[in-house]
Image (tube, helix red, strand yellow):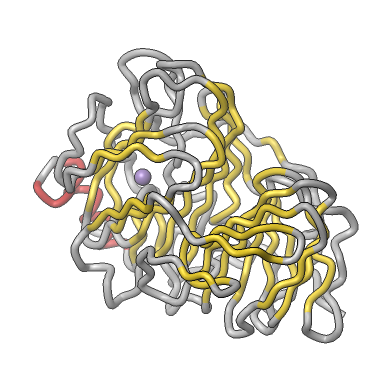
Amino acid sequence: MVRLRTGSVYHPPQATSGNRGPTATRRIGQTSRMSGPVQSRDVTEDPAHPEDPDGAPGPPPDLEVTPSRTAEVGSMTVRRALPRRTRRTVGAWCFADHMGPHRVAPGDGVDIGPHPHIGLHTVTWLVAGELLHRDSLGSEQTIRPGQLNLMTAGRGVSHAEESTSGYSGDLHGIQLWVAQPEATRHGDPAFEHHEELPRTEVDGGVGTVLVGAFGGATSTARTDTDLLGVDLQLHGRSSFGLRAEREHALVVLDGAVAPAGSSRAGAVDAPPEPVGTGHLVYLAPGHDELTLDPTGPTRLLLLGGEPFESQVLMWWNFVGRTREEVEAAREDWERGGERFGDPGSPLDRIPAPPVPWRPTT
Ligand code: MN
C-alpha cells in the first residue's frame, strides 16, 4: 500500500489571483510571459529555514498528486507544476511552467524581454507554435515542436523569448529549469539547440528523449547531474522501466492518465481519477517499473533524476544556495554590468523586483 499525502490526491486546478511578478514590456501587441519568475509563494525564501506546510515531517509519500498553480498571464494560462511549497525539486528539475494551448496571431504571442539567470539550465519544449530565443552569448535560434533549446546559465547569462513574426496558430509548450550542481554552477554559460531528438517505441505509444536515456535511446543534450526527460505520446496502456534510485514526476500536457501500477510493494494505488493537465504526479525513489493507463490519446512528460545534492534557494530567475549570492546577482543585473551581457532583443529588459527578505548588506 502506498502512502498518499493527506489532501494531495486529485484536486481540480485551483485558480489564483493574477500573477504579481514583473512582466515583459513589448513595444507592440500583447504583453505576455512564458516563464515567470519564481515568487516567494512558490518556494520558501531560505533553505536554512524550510517550511513544512504539512506539519510533522515524515517519509515522502510514494505517490503524490499536487495541483499546479495556475495564473492568467496576458491572455495565456500558465500552469506552474514546479516549484510548489510541498514539492520543490524532482531530481535536479526545479521549475516547470506549462503554457497553452493558446491561439496566437502575428504580433500577439509570448514575448519575454531580456532577463538574467544563474545556476540553472532552461529547457524549452514546444507541442505547437514557434519561439525565437536570443541570448547574451549571441545565440539567435527559432525553436519549433520536436526541437529542444537548452541554455546553461552557470555564473550568469541573459536571454529573451520572442514570438516569431508571421506565426499564427496554437502556442503550446513547457519551460523547465534544471538546477546546476555545485561542480558546474559557477562555470561558463552555454546554449544548445537540438534539431532532432531520439525516439523510442514503448508499449502503447512513442517516447521522445529530451535528456538522458530511455528505452534504448539516448539524448545528446547536456546534463550535469543524473537526469531524465521524456515526452510520451500514448494511445494505450504503457509499462516501462524506471531506475529505482531516481525520483520521477509526470506532467500531463494533453489528455489524462492514471498511474495504474508499479513494481514496488505490488502496486501503486491509482488516484481516484485520472490525472490531466494542471497537476504534478510525483513518484518517490524505489520503483523500477511504472504502468500508465491513458484515458485516450495523451501526451505527457516523464521527468526523473537522483534526488538533488542539496537544497536550492530559488528566487526570481536565480537558482543559488545563499541569499548573498542571489542579492549579488540581482545587483549585477540592475547595474547592467558585464556579468549578464545583452541578448540584443528589441524587447525591453525586465527589471528585478526587490528581494522579499531584509537585504544582508
Ligand atoms: Mn528565462
Q: Quadrant of ligand 1?
A: top left
- Residue at 76% x, 70% y is 239
Q: Nearer the viewer, residue 275 or 25?
A: 275
Name the image quarter holding residue 207. bottom right
Picture residue at 75% right of the left edge, 70% below the top: 63
Q: Which image quadrant: the N terminus?
A: bottom right
Q: Which residue is at a point 80% across and 70% down the rendered structure image?
A: 4
- Residue 325, percent from left and from top: 25, 62
Q: Is residue 311 above or below residue 355?
A: below
Residue 41 visible in the picture:
yes
- Looking at the picture, how far across and down is residue 257, in whole percent? 79, 55
**Residue 133, position in %: x, y?**
32, 39
Residue 88 vs residue 183, the one in the foreground: 183
Residue 114 percent across, percent down from the top left:
27, 36
**Residue reaching furthest left?**
338
**Quadrant housing residue 269:** bottom right
Report the quarter where the C terminus lies. bottom left
State left or right for residue 147 relative to residue 276: left
For the point 45% across and 72% down, which residue is it?
311
The reply to whether residue 5 is visible in this rendering is no
